Image (cartoon, rainbow, N blue to C red):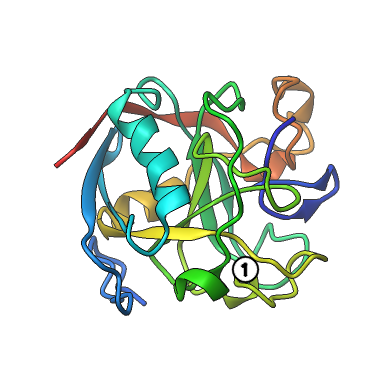
Amino acid sequence: MIRVLLATSAGALLLGCSSGNDSGQAFPNTGKGVTTVLETELGNIHIEVYPEKAPISSKDFLYYIEEGIYQDQGFYRVVHPENDPKKMGMSIVQGGTLDLRPYTALIEHESTETTGFSNIKGSVALARNEPGTASAAYFFVNVTDNPFLDHGGNRNQDGQGYAVFGRVTKGMGVLEKMQELKTYSEDTKDQLPPEFPLEPNQTLFNPVFIKKTYRK
């Protein structure tokens, strides 16, 4: 089953900085960070993860990076105020495995209440259904501040939010470009692969492929 970010017509689904590359938002008390690079068709994205503050989520993400699991996978979903079904102004880009299956066991939910992080612009978090169903197979980047995705937020009924484990330090401009790409529409939704039960206007017509990943 696909792990997603929010409620859509398909049910409970997955899923500050300038318009330039750098996040510009510092996380408090992050501990030692680990820099990773995702080379995509549109440019490189640098994600710094924080194992000391979010050990479970970070470990899973780093495994996917180091094992090359994201290679030939990519980014496939964009949400912005115009296609947000809950009209909350949410803006994210979601990626991971294009077959939408995890390559490791599902992991425990690391609440933002526990880590002290927040779903601010540039932060990276794991998508999920109910708590305990997250995996680095499906992660998302907050393209704006989305505080309703934190613990206690009202985006989902359980109020547990989404586990933030890192932030984009370079490449936000690449993610902003992704949000401008063509998505499926009501007229073309019959062309959606059956394994993508997402809202058509949130699903990229052509995913942005990840060519290579590594720790820097």
Name the residue that disc number 1 marks.
149
Expressed as whole percent of the image width and height from the top left, the position of residue 178 reads 43, 46
Is residue 119 visible in the rendered image? The answer is: no
At label 1, counting other C-alpha atoms closer than 10 Å, the crowd grade (few under 14, some 14-19, many 20 or more) is many
179 sits to left or right of 30: right
Quarter of the image where one finds residue 61: top left
User: 134 or 10: which is nearer to us?
Assistant: 134
User: 147 or 102: which is nearer to us?
Assistant: 102
* Residue at left offset 46%, top offset 76%: 116
Expressed as whole percent of the image width and height from the top left, the position of residue 31 reads 25, 67
Relative height, residue 190 to residue 11 (above, below): above
User: 127 or 40: which is nearer to us?
Assistant: 127
76 sits to left or right of 133: left
Expressed as whole percent of the image width and height from the top left, the position of residue 184 reads 66, 35
Q: Image quadrant for the N terminus?
A: top right
Total labels drawn: 1
Relative height, residue 172 to residue 40 (above, below): below
Toward the left, the furthest residue is 216
24 sits to left or right of 149: left
* Residue at left offset 73%, top offset 68%: 155
* Residue at left offset 32%, top offset 23%: 68
Quarter of the image where one finds residue 148: bottom right
Is residue 161 visible in the rendered image? The answer is: yes
Expressed as whole percent of the image width and height from the top left, the position of residue 25 reads 31, 76
* Residue at left offset 33%, top offset 55%: 51
Q: Image quadrant for the C terminus?
A: top left
- Give amino acid for label 1: Leu
